Image (cartoon, rainbow, N blue to C red):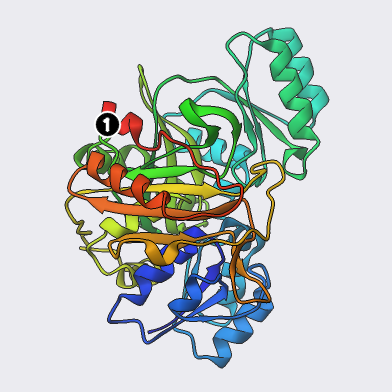
Amino acid sequence: MRVLLVGAGGREHALAWKIAQSPLCEHLWIVPGNPGTATLGTNVDLAADDAAGIVGLATREQIDLVVVGPEAPLVAGLGEVCEAVDLAMFGPSSEAAQLEGSKAFAKMIMLEAGVPTAAAHTFDNSAAAIAFVEADQQAWVVKADGLAAGKGVIVPEDGDVAATISAIRELAATNAGTRLVLEEKLTGPEVSLLALCDGERAIPLIAAQDHKRIGDNDTGGNTGGMGSYAPAPILPYAEAQALVDVIFTPVLRTMAARQIPYRGVLYAGLMLTPNGVKVIEFNARFGDPETQALLPLLKSDLLELLHKVATSNLADVTIEWHDGAAVCVVLSAAGYPAKPRTGDVITGLDRLPSDVLAFQAGTATNAQGELVTAGGRVLGITAVAPTLREARDKAYAATELVEFAGKYQRSDIAARGLAE
């Protein structure tokens, strides 16, 4: 199979790494890719949102399957462009991707499908949202309706009405915040549960947990994710499978009834509240950095699974997993998440043990051929071991071998998993 992977982050490096292992993979192209993916296939210098360029490349290279990593090309309609030329693609249409692209749409679908979620109100402008909060005198979680690279949610302290209003103004000033969703604040641990969906059927992956805040103990600003681990002890696989009938199947049926079949991976961000499991968000793609912890544990052929999803053929499919646990620790650049510094030389990857994976994200090659930082989240160091504690220790030991000026990492990735 000739495969074209769209994206340039750590998630895409992990996807490329796993796809390249498949005996079904004849050759892999990555658009635009990064220095890590270049070791696994052919990087092509096109933008991830250049739908015409991607389809042109796919036609020239006789691509059998397009796999889309990030959300932006999906929401922008790459799926429709591929469908128009009869090109198989893993990933939902732009309409279906509104489950991530619009918090208001996702909330509407959840309520229509009977999926447990937080109470919420949607506003078309900040003035209406502020007027509601001033009258209500309660603190609400504030969410920008549109795509915000994982940074479109602000959670005020309990009862802090002033902070809620400040959050409304902050998010309303962004491109993603032209509409706003105010949501009831829930309490409990969060967990990421992803399922492969072919329009009718959903097969869950093992649960993972990520770490969204920049600082230890979940302090500081939101990021795209500072680390992850799998499986999450707090949601065993049997319980994850049971949630298919509670969350994924009702959503697929509701979307199908609207003539918007959902094919791809559906990421449910869950909160395990005292009143049961509640969905706090949907994403229309693999999580980053959850993917970097999940794929090293996947025993099944990823490419075969992706193709079955794209061709609506998940009937009788089961997913097999390796025993053990995986931990991914993200190394970020100086200044992240506000204004990451770039151009710092990265050393030490050649010193990593052979069983430790370094998934590249914000990296580039400079004029001297050196690997340098080129984004906020630079590397994801992933280790697999029989136990979560061993995987965590191995991952952190490996991070000490990698150096670049301004390197930052959280020190508590997977610590909560050890306590569960």
Above or below, 324 against 164 in this view is below
Please give the residue where the numbered disc 1 appears in the rendered image: 418
Left or right: 96 as drawn, with respect to 196: right
Q: Nearer the viewer, residue 401 or 246?
A: 401
Give the vertical position of 301 relative to 293 (above or below): below
Residue 23 horizontal side relative to residue 322, left or right: right
Q: Residue at x 75, y 19 (%)?
A: 165
Q: Identify the residue at image location x=30%, y=51%.
A: 205
The answer to whether residue 285 shows anywhere in this view is: no
Quadrant where the image shows the C terminus: top left
Q: What's the residue type where badge 1 is placed?
A: Leu
In the image, residue 388 above or below residue 37: above
Q: Quadrant of residue 412?
A: top left
Instruction: Tell me the quarter of the image containing the N terminus.
Output: bottom left
Does residue 301 appear anywhere in the picture? yes
357 up-or-down from 249: above or below = below
